[in-house]
Image (cartoon, coloured by chain):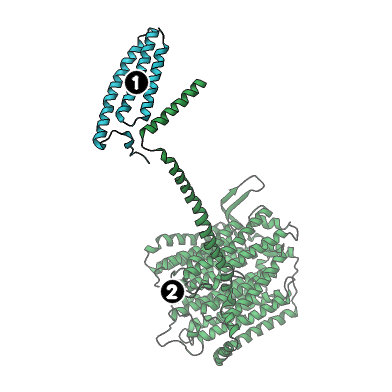
Chain colours: A green, B cyan
């Protein structure tokens, strides 16, 4: 059965090839949509079959590696040999990620049939989406760093292609002069910022190869158990891998591309920038948990960066007016929670949050897409309001998503977020400070989400008379409903022991993280009363956030404006995203451009290199100017030289 | 017979011919100098032939004279063509093929 694993990766690749080569000739949207979604659906079915089979197996038997072929083979037989194969590893962690990618991916593909209706690039969209799923599956199913990196780069490429899907459409990109940038600039920004992270990933791979002699997961993690503690190379590996993760998963300092990635169509934002690509960094940390267990310093850094990102992005989301930007910063914030979890060595809690976040964030993005669709591409929530009457299904599902992300039980977000907060508090690698930042972030999350709900769906309508919003078609609402159901029940796989649950997801993932926990010398915690208190506190805090948001934005709407007037500096600081883009522009981008243009181009390229090339030509010319004067045209002078030569020859002959 | 005087005369006339070729401006004088060079060689050949008692040298002289005559004919034809184009036989004026 496990030999069918490559099919999971193959179906989307076939979809991409067929759609890419023939899609422009197929005019039937339904056929294109079925083709595009069908491949992902088939992958999902295979993954489900594998999963069901794995459920029936003993935990030790659940891992399988399917080796397809050898990709790179160098220096075989020496101590520095490198052998990399295209091989897919199915174990508890990768099958979980595969199910998320193909399952949520399938729903979003179906949604896109409705959302992208009428777009001339319909076939191209599905081709790129299929390519993305292919790359993402390579990432999560790879059994070595190099294949994972192929997937890593592949999803970055697809992100670029899909963000800039409607190229030449005007779009404000942070750090650019207002009015000059297009969606292509947003796509370029995403790719370039990602690249910086990829550089860290590559350096980490080099270090891993130098230290462990292989790039295969089993080989590296197997040898990791015999590495001594306090080895500084491990810390560098951990930090550099994390740098790659900050790029891909939008943490400080490389998060600036994600809000501008909202230039792409909403299904892209849902799939790539909420449910799957941005979780690649979290998956990578989970996969390399053993390496991180050898470098607790890197874990500390990760936890702090994650917590700071979580709260910083939440504060920015408080004041944004574009519906997708709020959700984008919300994604950055939730990813911060996932890294906070990883950083306090609560690896399965982080993956659990990946799962629940995929459900409710995809739901929220798709719901916002339905709103944008209904409002004829209006995205400013200040121009919405009262839409719950016109878009009932969208409203109900969006509300469910908002409650889930706010962390209200028994919805999915509560279990995963609470697990993270508890672990941040109680773990040997956590601290009260991290927990406190997390709780404040949770309060802000509840507040800004319900600000969004209130301003978009509730209250009085603030849009013009000529707009008649109507509910989305079935292809769009059915995925919303499915995701809403998942957002409600999705948390039940992780009910903690304190609430008398079996915490199935932690049990499922236990063999993956056991080596890391052993290295970190972590002991299982018994259930304490503190856990219940903290749980109660976070629910109250979330509830308070929701209540405040509803009061401020529904009943006393003047309050928000008065705050804006009383603290204009703070408001501007938050609205302009802490001026991070502007800071990067002045500190990094502008000097680089200046050096490149002023010095490297005008100085070296024009003066030195062109100077050498043109100069040598000029030198030849000058020499020629002198030498050509021999040709006077007077035959007697030629004859004179002739005779002179003969004389010399004669003298030489006589002297010999 | 004595060889040396003949060779000396041949050498002297040859050198006079070379100097003439190199330094005279009039094209006809240059040709005359070339003829002088050819004839000095003829003299040298005949002297050797008499000294060695071998007829081969005299045979070569016949060939050389024939060639010299043909060459003079062609050379004079070139000079006439030159004169018709440029109205001069001063070879210093024939210098278009230059830098």
Q: Visible in this render: residue A221?
A: yes
- Give the image location of residue A2, x and y in percent: 57, 58
Give the answer, above or below, for where A219 lies relative to A419: above
**Residue A405 location, quadrant:** bottom right
Disc number at residue A472?
none
List the residue tagged with mark 1.
B38
Instruction: Tell which of A136 and A372 is nearer to you.
Output: A372
Identify the image quadrant of the N terminus of chain A: bottom right
Within 10 Å of disc 2 (Cα), the crowding (few <14, some 14-19, many 20+) is many
Residue A114, which numbered label? 2
Task: Please tell me in which quadrant of the rendered image residue A22 appears.
Answer: bottom left
Q: Chain of mark 1?
A: B
Please give left or right for residue A501 compared with residue A464 in the image. right
Front in this rendered view, residue A611 or B37: B37
What residue do we see at 47% from left, 59% from top? A14
Return the chain for callout 2: A
Q: Secondary structure at mark 2?
A: helix
Q: Respond whether the residues carrying marks 1 and 2 are from the same subunit.
A: no
> How far across and down, in percent of the image, does residue B92 sit?
33, 35
Res. A474 image quadrant: bottom left
Of the pair A510 and A24, the residue shown nearer to us: A24
Q: Residue A255: x and y, percent? A: 58, 71
Left/right of residue A495 with respect to residue A476 in the rendered view: right
Q: How far across and down, in percent of the image, does residue A519 sit?
A: 74, 63
């Amino acid at each position: 059965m496990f030999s069918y694993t490559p099919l999971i990766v193959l179906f989307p690749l076939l979809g991409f090839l067929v759609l890419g080569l023939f899609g422009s000739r197929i005019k039937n949207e339904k056929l294109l949509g079925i083709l595009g979604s069908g491949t992902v659906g088939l992958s999902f079915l295979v993954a489900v079959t594998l999963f069901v089979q794995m459920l029936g197996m003993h935990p030790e038997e659940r891992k399988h590696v399917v080796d397809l072929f050898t990709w790179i083979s160098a220096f075989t037989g020496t101590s520095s040999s490198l052998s990399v194969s295209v091989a897919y590893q199915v174990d508890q962690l990768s099958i979980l990620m595969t199910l998320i990618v193909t399952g949520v991916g399938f729903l979003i593909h179906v949604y896109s049939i409705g959302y992208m209706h009428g777009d001339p690039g319909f076939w191209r969209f599905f081709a790129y989406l299929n390519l993305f799923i292919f790359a993402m599956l390579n990432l999560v199913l790879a059994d070595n760093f190099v294949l994972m990196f192929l997937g890593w780069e592949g999803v970055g490429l697809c992100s670029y292609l899909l963000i800039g899907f409607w190229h030449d459409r005007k779009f404000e990109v942070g750090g650019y002069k207002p009015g000059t940038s297009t969606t292509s600039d947003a796509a370029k920004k995403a790719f370039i910022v990602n690249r910086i992270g990829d550089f860290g990933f590559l350096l980490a791979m080099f270090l891993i190869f130098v230290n462990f002699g292989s790039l295969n997961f089993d080989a590296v993690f197997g040898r990791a158990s015999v590495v001594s503690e306090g080895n500084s190379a491990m810390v560098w590996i951990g930090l550099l891998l994390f740098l790659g993760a900050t790029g891909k998963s939008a943490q400080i300092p490389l998060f600036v591309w994600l809000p501008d990635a909202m230039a792409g169509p909403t299904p892209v934002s849902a799939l790539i920038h909420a449910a799957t690509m941005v979780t690649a960094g979290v998956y990578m940390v989970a996969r390399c948990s053993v390496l991180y267990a050898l470098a607790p310093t890197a874990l500390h850094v990760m936890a702090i960066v994650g917590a700071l990102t979580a709260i910083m992005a939440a504060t920015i989301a408080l004041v944004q007016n574009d519906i997708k930007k709020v959700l984008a910063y919300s994604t950055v914030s939730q990813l911060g929670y996932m890294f906070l979890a990883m950083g306090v060595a609560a690896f399965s809690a982080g993956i659990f949050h990946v799962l629940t976040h995929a459900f409710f964030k995809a739901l929220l993005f798709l719901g916002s897409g339905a709103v944008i669709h209904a409002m004829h591409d209006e995205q400013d929530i200040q121009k919405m309001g009262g839409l719950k009457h016109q878009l009932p299904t969208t409203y109900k599902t969006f509300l469910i998503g908002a409650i889930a992300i706010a962390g209200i039980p028994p919805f999915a977000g509560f279990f995963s977020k609470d697990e993270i907060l508890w672990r941040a508090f109680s773990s040997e690698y956590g601290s009260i400070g991290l927990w406190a930042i997390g709780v404040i972030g949770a309060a802000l999350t509840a507040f800004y989400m319900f600000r969004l709900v209130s301003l978009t769906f509730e209250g009085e309508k603030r849009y013009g008379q000529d707009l008649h919003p109507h509910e989305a078609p079935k292809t769009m609402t059915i995925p919303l409903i499915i995701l809403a159901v998942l957002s409600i029940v999705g948390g039940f796989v992780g009910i903690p022991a304190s609430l008398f649950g079996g915490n199935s997801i932690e049990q499922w993932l236990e063999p993956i993280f056991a080596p890391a926990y052993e290295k970190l010398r972590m002991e299982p915690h018994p259930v304490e009363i503190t856990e219940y208190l903290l749980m109660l506190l976070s629910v109250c805090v979330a509830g308070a956030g929701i209540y405040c948001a509803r009061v401020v934005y529904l009943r006393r709407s003047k309050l928000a404006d008065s705050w804006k007037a009383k603290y204009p500096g703070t408001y501007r600081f938050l609205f302009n995203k802490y001026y991070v883009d502007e800071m990067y522009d002045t500190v990094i981008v502008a000097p680089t451009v200046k050096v490149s243009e002023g010095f490297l181009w005008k100085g070296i390229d024009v003066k030195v290199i062109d100077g050498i090339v043109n100069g040598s030509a000029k030198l030849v010319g000058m020499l020629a100017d002198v030498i050509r004067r021999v040709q006077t045209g007077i035959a007697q002078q030629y004859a004179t030289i002739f005779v002179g030569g003969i004389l010399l020859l004669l003298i030489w002959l006589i002297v010999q | 017979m004595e060889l040396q005087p003949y060779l000396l005369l041949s050498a002297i006339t040859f050198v006079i011919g070379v100097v003439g070729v190199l330094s005279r401006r009039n094209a006809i004088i240059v040709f005359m100098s070339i003829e002088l060079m050819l004839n000095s060689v003829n003299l040298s050949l005949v002297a050797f032939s008499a000294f060695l008692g071998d007829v081969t040298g005299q045979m070569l002289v016949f060939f050389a004279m024939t060639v010299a005559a043909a060459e003079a004919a062609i050379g004079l034809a070139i000079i006439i063509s030159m004169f018709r184009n440029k109205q001069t036989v001063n070879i210093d004026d024939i210098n278009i093929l230059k830098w």
